[in-house]
Amino acid sequence: MNLGSETGGDGVPPANKGLLAAASVLLLIPIVALMWVSSYARETPRLGGIPFFFWYQFAWVFLCSAMTWTAYKLVLAARPRPPARGPGEQR
């Protein structure tokens, strides 16, 4: 069975590289933001009496989970499912 030029050699459609790049950037942002400690290693501004150092990192818990979920959805959209096979078709 010839699947044509719209699929890879294994029958899987090619991935959207732009969406995969966007997902990679979304996963890289929290890593860079939290590894750059000198940007948040201070006490002010305080939020409800909590030093900046602590609430900044705590905020990243929620930001990172949102970015990871968005990256996951982008990867799902970038890698379409292979065409469905009929009951009698072989790989």
Image (cartoon, rainbow, N blue to C red):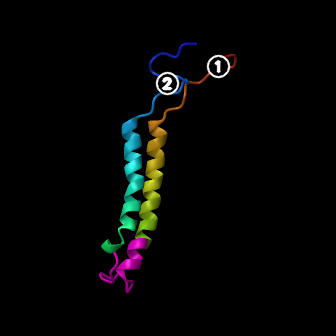
Of residue 47 and residue 32, the one placed in the foreground of this image is 32
Q: In front of the other: label 1 or label 2?
A: 2
Give the main secondary structure of the magenta stretch. Answer: loop
Q: Which residue is drawn at 69% across and 16% down?
A: 88
- Dot 2 falls on a residue whose secondary structure is loop
Relative height, residue 77 to residue 26 (above, below)? above
Q: Residue at x 40, y 76 (%)?
A: 55
**Residue bearing the label numbered 2:** 8
Tag 1 and tag 2, C-beta contact below 8 Å:
no
Q: In which quarter of the image is residue 46?
A: bottom left
Return the residue found at the far top: 1
Relative height, residue 88 to residue 37 (above, below)? above
For the N terminus, which image quadrant? top right
- Indicate yes or no whether the magenta region holds residue 53: yes
Return the residue found at the far right: 88
Q: Which of marks 1 and 2 is nearer the N terminus?
A: 2
Q: Where is residue 23 in the image (x, y as percent from the top left)?
A: 41, 47
Q: Quadrant of residue 42?
A: bottom left
Stretch in magenta: 40-57
How crowded pointer 2 is (Cα within 10 Å; few <14, some 14-19, many 20+) is rated as few
- Indicate yes or no whether the magenta region holds residue 39: no
Q: Which residue is drawn at 41% across and 78% down?
A: 54
Relative height, residue 10 to residue 42 (above, below)? above
Amino acid carrying label 2: it is: Gly
Amino acid carrying label 1: it is: Gly
Q: Is residue 14 left or right of residue 51?
A: right
**Residue bearing the label numbered 1:** 86
Q: Residue at x 39, y 55 (%)?
A: 28
